[in-house]
Image (cartoon, coloured by chain):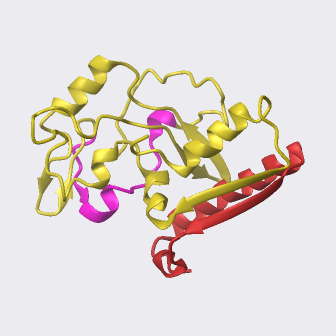
Chain colours: A yellow, B red
Amino acid sequence: MRGYGPDQALLKLKRVYREHPTPVVFFGFTSENVNRIVNVYRWALDVQTYHTPLGWDGTPFFEGTRPRFLLQDGSLVLLPNPVWTREELRRLIHDPSVGTVSGGSITSPKDTTPRTSNRSCVSHTPCRSFAGSPVGRSTAVRPRNIRLYL
Amino acid sequence: MKDDRVFSLLIALFDDFERFAQSRRFRPYIILFGQPADLEI
């Protein structure tokens, strides 16, 4: 799965372990995967290499978003996936304001404050829209005030 | 790792993995594919 992260693997382990118990579990990841634990929109990790989320034929190349965890006061806080429908995903992919690279900065539609390019892809400033989400919630409830978190 | 906040989040995920292992009584192993230098650890 494109853009899958180790944190998602952990979420899946917790979901399926009861059905598939085993005496040993290996949690494997590559060093590159570390970037993914602080990423929501996969394209944001590669925005400086791929200046558009669309492929050469105009179809979406980076077509997924993902949940992630924040570390707040020593506890993991699950941020639900900010995009839940195909229409929202289509708007995200075709929104020219998303991922605008200008002078080494990247912008998002909800927060137009430019961020330093390298860290913007793996930024971890707490997103207030998701603050207070229960830790490890298995059935995430979508926040009303969605804020894309790059 | 250059950014301690990313490293802290990664360690917190590992800790959560180990807590889950203890609660379900399986042996947890963490494997890094790549070079530790990539993480600067």
Estimate the x, y position of residue A135 in percent, counting from the top left. 67, 38
Q: Name the residue at 82% across, 50% down.
A: B21
Q: Is residue B9 visible?
A: no
Occupied quadrant, residue A102: bottom left
A120 lies above or below A87: below
Q: Is residue A62 visible?
A: yes
Q: Name the residue at 20% across, 46% down.
A: A99
Occupied quadrant, residue B28: bottom right
A61 lies above or below A44: above
Estimate the x, y position of residue B18 in percent, counting from the top left. 78, 55
| Left or right: A144 as drawn, with respect to A73 | left
Estimate the x, y position of residue A129 in percent, counting from the top left. 45, 33
| Left or right: B31 as drawn, with respect to A25 | left
| Left or right: A52 as drawn, with respect to B22 | left
Is A114 covered by the magenta stretch? yes
Estimate the x, y position of residue B34 in percent, counting from the top left. 50, 72
Is B2 covered by the magenta stretch? no
Label count reads 0
Magenta span:
A111-130
Q: Name the residue at 47% across, 71% down.
A: B3
Q: Nearer the viewer, residue A54 or A82?
A: A54
Question: Is the C terminus of chain B in the top left, top right, bottom left or bottom right quadrant?
Answer: bottom right
Q: Nearer the viewer, residue A15 or A113?
A: A15
A91 lies above or below A3: above
